[in-house]
């Protein structure tokens, strides 16, 4: 069974990591930190399929569930990521139940869908019985991040075979506010918190997973309290920039106002 499904079955929330840097070593470092899942971002990440496959290979030993956010609702992109070994797909900008149904279809072999057979790497990564288990194991997440998608929330979450909703708070804020709110995570506006809570309730009502992209552990914990079952807390680019900025700031603070010290050679 997909490890995320097992954890959710035990009633446990899960923590997802986000990889936007197209590098296998960076991905390996991320996956080794104990996240329950790791998502490789093929939409906005600085990477493509030639990066995705070695990143999956590097992360395999971690035991984390490996997901991919595809660039768009495109059958070729979805099936290619699955054949590379993705155990779930996050699809952006799903606005209608019809689009959600298409996503589900692209991820399931007949008779449940229209996925073409050819699990080039997946059969090696997940075992010889991959084709038998794939329909039940693969996770289909539709992203709700527009006013149209939010208006069609009840219809989208009712899509047969859809496993969850992944909320992109930056785009959702821009769309719902018609550009009046700046893009960003960890929303504090009452209307945005109400929208996020409504999505969680809708998912609970249909027995599917609500997932949210967050910027901090504190906000992720709040989201779990609202009913979200999976949260993402930052990603490789944010962790790298924050860690580097912290080191530089710490050094500047500790050495500000000091005269350079001479070394053993007098200079």
Image (tube, rainbow, N blue to C red):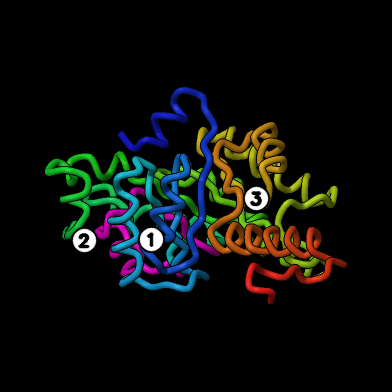
Q: Can you give x and y, in whole percent of width and height, for residue 243 in the image?
A: 63, 58
Please report the bounds of the magenta region as a residue range: 71-93
Earlier sequence position, callout 2 versus callout 3: 2
The residue that label 3 is drawn on is 214
Residue in the image at 44% along x and 29% along y: 7
Q: Is residue 197 above or below residue 173?
A: above
In the picture of the structure, the residue carrying the numbered disc 2 is 116
Q: Which residue is drawn at 50% across and 37% down?
A: 208
Disc 1 residue crowd, few under 14, some 14–19, many 20+, Cα 10 Å: some
Residue furthest to the bottom = 267
* Marks 1 & 3, CB-CB < 8 Å contact: no
Q: Which of marks 1 and 3 is nearer the N terminus?
A: 1
Q: Quadrant of the C terminus?
A: bottom right
Distance from Cα at disc 1 to Cα at disc 3: 24 Å
Q: Name the residue under label 1.
A: 25
Which residue is located at x 52 percent, y 70 percent?
44
The local secondary structure at tag 2 comes to: loop
Q: Position of residue 190 (x, y in %)?
A: 85, 48
Front tag of 1 and 3: 1
Name the residue rendered at 87%, 67% in the picture.
257
């Amino acid at each position: 069974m997909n490890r995320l499904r097992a954890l959710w079955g035990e009633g446990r929330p899960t923590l997802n990591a986000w990889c936007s840097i197209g590098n296998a070593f960076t991905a390996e470092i991320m996956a080794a930190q104990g996240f329950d899942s790791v998502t490789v971002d093929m939409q906005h990440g600085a990477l493509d399929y030639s990066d995705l496959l070695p990143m999956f290979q590097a992360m395999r030993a971690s035991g984390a569930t490996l997901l991919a956010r595809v660039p768009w609702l495109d059958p070729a992109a979805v099936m290619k990521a699955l054949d590379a070994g993705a155990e779930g797909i996050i699809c952006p900008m799903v606005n209608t139940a019809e689009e959600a149904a298409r996503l589900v279809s692209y991820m399931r072999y007949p008779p449940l869908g229209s996925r073409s057979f050819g699990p080039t790497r997946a059969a090696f990564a997940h075992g010889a019985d991959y084709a038998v288990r794939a329909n039940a194991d693969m996770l289909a997440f539709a992203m709700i991040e527009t006013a149209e998608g939010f208006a069609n929330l009840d219809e989208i979450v009712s899509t047969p075979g859809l496993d969850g909703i992944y909320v992109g708070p930056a785009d959702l804020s821009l769309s719902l506010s018609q550009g009046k709110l700046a893009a960003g995570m960890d929303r504090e506006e009452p209307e945005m918190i109400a929208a996020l809570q409504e999505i969680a309730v809708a998912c609970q009502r249909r027995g599917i997973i609500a997932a949210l992209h967050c910027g901090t552990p504190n906000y992720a914990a709040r989201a779990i309290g609202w009913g979200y079952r999976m949260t993402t807390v930052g990603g490789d680019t944010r962790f790298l920039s924050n860690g580097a900025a912290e080191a530089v700031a710490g050094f500047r603070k500790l050495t500000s106002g000091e005269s350079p010290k001479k070394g053993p050679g007098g200079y």
